[in-house]
Image (cartoon, rainbow, N blue to C red):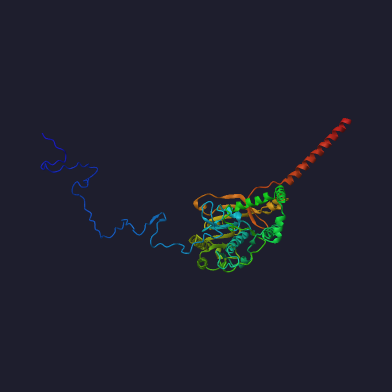
């Protein structure tokens, strides 16, 4: 009796053996190069058109789309900004110590420090909100514009027609150009000292005679007097305070201190500042802004929008999201298009929209940074006046809150600060400093004195009554 395997052919002994096929797996193909293919053959043609689902390599350039991120550049791609880049030798430009991004000053050194970049990063926007009917934010807008005009006149004060900075103001108030503050030159004593120092530095016969008569012993005596009264220490403190605002001495004209009580002379010309009416249609406003930027190529552009949505400066229809959103979105797109040489600052009074939190939240989303000014009420100001009765220069006028900062908040970093900073509007400058509740010592001392006198009188009466009882 003979046994055979299943599937073995009895008649043909020379035929190759077939592989066992499992009924579960179905028919299996032979390995390549082991025999003729059993399946359908694929014909390959060289001149055949590409398959619609087949990936065809591009020999001109590599271009991949990954969740909206485009790597590489196609030959038909065009640059977003074809205008010349900003000159790196611009006096108002310096790298950020945090991100190395090019920044410019807001005109307020304390605000530059608060933003974390020692300035305003290019290609970004900032919204300053004020939570009352006061007008402290107008000082920051004037200082912002004045800083650009001063940068424009640093290199050539006499002929500033071909400057390096241009201001675009979206407002009907042309008086802003005449109300810009001038550069702070110091107090009267400092001005006199500077004039005396300039005269002494000149080479004249009288100065040479004074220097010869000034013996080494007299110089040593002057140094001892200066050391005794701390004159050199005061100068050192001033230098340290100056380094806090500008740590790099290689940018001397980056930031200036402005005197709020003075005006900038001469008044800015039309080549330095441009005004655009907000009553125009949104399309025409955006086209005029972009045309102005293109006309002043290779210049730093500062876009200023003071008191946005104020009823006296804007039409009533702009107080709706469907009207204001296209304007702000268009300005933001222009800002990102010319991000190498544009910044934008805007101010708004939230008291006009106190009952519309969603409206304000939508507007804040269209800005890269948001800073809030909260002025103190009358009771708080009276308390500060009593606490700083002997030091009126320390009286603050409100709190500063940070909702988001340029570049940092876009990266997802939490830079939210509430009631950590306070501002004060002095006679010469707008300052921002750390907030701390002062201690009112005068009332406490008076209360303690009255309580001690009351206890002494009570003890005296008690002792007097006690002596009377003893005598009785």
Image label count: 0
Residue 184, image x, y percentages: 65, 59
Query: Which sits in the foreground, 297 or 239?
Result: 239
Quarter holding residue 156: bottom right
- 153 versus 97 height, above or below: below
Residue 359, visible in the rendered structure:
no
Percent of width and height locating residue 299 = 53, 64
The part of the image, by quadrant, that contains residue 157 is bottom right
Q: Where, quadrant-wise, is the N terminus in this rendering?
A: top left
Viewer-nearest residue: 338 or 152:
152
Residue 356 pos. (x, y %) = 57, 57
| Image quadrant where one finds the C terminus | top right
User: What residue lies at 74% left-to-right and 46% top-to-bottom?
Assistant: 443
Residue at 58% from the left image edge and 50% from the top image edge: 417
In this view, 28 is above or below 371: above
39 left or right of 100 in image: left
Residue extending furthest toward the right: 472
Query: For this view, does 188 lie left or right of residue 330?
Result: right
- In the displayed structure, does residue 68 sit left or right of residue 101? left
Q: Position of residue 52 (x, y in %)?
A: 31, 58
- As drawn, 1 above or below 147: above
In front: 362, or 48?
48
Determine if residue 171 is in view: yes
């Amino acid at each position: 009796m003979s046994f055979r395997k299943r599937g073995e052919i009895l008649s043909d002994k020379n035929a190759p053996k077939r592989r066992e096929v499992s009924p579960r797996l179905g028919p299996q193909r032979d390995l390549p190069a082991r025999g003729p293919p059993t399946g359908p053959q694929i014909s390959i043609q060289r001149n055949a058109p590409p398959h619609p689902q087949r990936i065809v390599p591009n020999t001109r350039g590599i271009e991949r789309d990954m969740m909206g991120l485009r790597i590489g550049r196609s030959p038909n791609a065009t640059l977003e900004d074809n205008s010349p880049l900003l000159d790196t030798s611009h006096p108002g430009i310096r790298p950020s110590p945090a991100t190395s991004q090019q920044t410019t000053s807001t005109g307020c050194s304390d605000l530059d420090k608060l933003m974390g970049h020692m300035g305003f990063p290019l290609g970004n926007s900032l919204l300053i909100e004020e939570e009352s009917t006061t007008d402290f934010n107008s000082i920051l807008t004037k200082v912002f514009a004045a800083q650009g005009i001063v940068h424009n006149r640093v290199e050539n004060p006499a002929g500033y027609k071909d400057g390096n900075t241009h201001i675009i103001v979206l407002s009907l108030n042309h008086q802003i150009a005449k109300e810009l503050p001038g550069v702070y030159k110091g107090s009267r004593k400092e001005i006199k000292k500077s004039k005396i120092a300039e005269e002494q530095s000149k080479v004249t016969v009288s100065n040479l005679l004074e220097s010869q008569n000034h013996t080494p012993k007299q110089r040593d005596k002057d140094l001892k007097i200066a050391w005794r009264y701390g004159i050199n220490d005061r100068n050192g403190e001033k230098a340290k305070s100056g380094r806090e605002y500008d740590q790099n001495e290689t940018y001397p004209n980056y930031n200036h201190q402005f005197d709020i009580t003075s005006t900038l002379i001469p008044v800015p010309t039309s080549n330095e500042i441009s005004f655009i009416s907000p009553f125009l249609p949104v399309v025409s406003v955006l086209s005029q802004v972009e045309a102005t930027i293109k006309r002043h190529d290779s210049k730093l552009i500062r876009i200023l929008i003071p008191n946005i949505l104020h009823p006296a400066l804007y039409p009533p229809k702009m107080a709706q999201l469907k009207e204001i959103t296209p304007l702000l979105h268009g300005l933001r797109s222009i800002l990102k298009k010319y991000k190498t040489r544009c910044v934008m600052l805007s101010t708004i009074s939230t008291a006009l929209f106190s009952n519309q939190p969603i409206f304000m939240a939508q507007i804040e989303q269209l800005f890269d940074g948001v800073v809030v000014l909260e002025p103190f009420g009358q009771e708080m100001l009276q308390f500060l006046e009593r606490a700083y009765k002997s030091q009126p220069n320390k009286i603050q006028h409100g709190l500063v809150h940070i909702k988001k900062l340029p570049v940092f908040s876009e990266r997802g970093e939490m830079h939210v600060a509430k009631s950590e900073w306070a501002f004060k509007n002095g006679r010469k400058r707008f300052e921002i400093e750390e907030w701390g509740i002062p201690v009112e010592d005068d009332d406490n001392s008076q209360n303690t004195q009255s309580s001690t006198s009351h206890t002494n009188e009570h003890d005296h009466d008690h002792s007097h009554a006690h002596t009377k009882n003893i005598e009785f």
